[in-house]
Amino acid sequence: NAGVMQNPRHLVRRRGQEARLRCSPMKGHSHVYWYRQLPEEGLKFMVYLQKENIIDESGMPKERFSAEFPKEGPSILRIQQVVRGDSAAYFCASSPPTGGWSYEQYFGPGTRLTVT
Amino acid sequence: AQSVTQLDSQVPVFEEAPVELRCNYSSSVSVYLFWYVQYPNQGLQLLLKYLSGSTLVKGINGFEAEFNKSQTSFHLRKPSVHISDTAEYFCAVSDNAGGTSYGKLTFGQGTILTVHP
């Protein structure tokens, strides 16, 4: 069973460009979480999605950031008009649909975004 | 709201020595507790978790942690470390009161464990 997959692993964008980060959850998992790890900091929750629904986006910046998890295909975290402060590692985690949400999240390897 | 404090940002130890990585949390509701390990340029791997029951939990790679509710702590221990344990360790909590937390994790700042030969 393949683990959580994220691509690209490394992404370089110039200021003002768009960044698209993809996350394919583990097989059978229908819940996806996105976290951001800024340099020298721990991970911070951004958004929690189930298939076709955003359940909790309380950690998402109000502007330029959006996320989706379509019925088919990976979850996408989209950052428009990137700025240097967006440079970070973005991690996706998935969990199985056990009782609404599970106690254990399985993390992908992350996408390291560098904004130049 | 919850918060997690990892009291040491860096812990250097010699190989085969014991180690304790400290974690304290604050929460207005009861919580689930987790320790994750992150090797360089990799994602997070779950070491162990406390959901309920025995306060001493054992995880992978010989690690264990003890939940102390009165001290709101969840310290991670290993009696004898190896070079391969060199990594960053994160303590995390999620609230178990149901409602709208949806299992999202609140992480500490991380502790870098460096094992020297």
Image (tube, grey):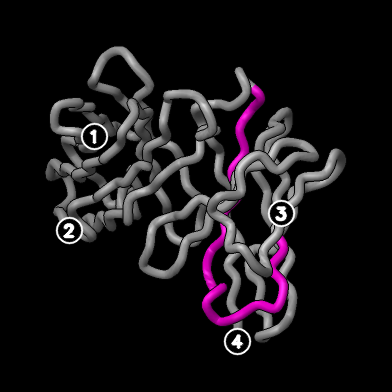
Magenta stretch contains residue A83:
yes
Of marks 3 and 4, the one in the foreground: 3
Q: Which mark is residue B12?
A: 2
Q: Chain of mark 2?
A: B
For the residues labelled 3 and 1, the Cα–Cα distance comes to 33 Å
Q: Position of residue A26 (x, y in %)?
A: 68, 36
Q: Chain of mark 4?
A: A
Could you say whether the residue bearing mark 2 is in a helix, strand or loop?
Answer: strand
Of marks 4 and 2, the one in the foreground: 4
**In this picture, which residue range is highlighted in magenta?**
A78-97
- Residue A2 visible in the shown view: no
Q: Nearer the viewer, residue B48 or B51?
A: B51
Q: Find out whether the residues at labels 3 and 4 contact each other: C-beta distance under 8 Å.
A: no
The quadrant holding residue B95 is top left
Q: Amino acid at mark 2?
A: Pro
For the residues labelled 2 and 3, the Cα–Cα distance comes to 39 Å
- Residue B65 visible in the shown view: yes
Write down the residue under mark 1. Answer: B74
Q: Chain of mark 3?
A: A
Q: Amino acid at mark 4?
A: Thr
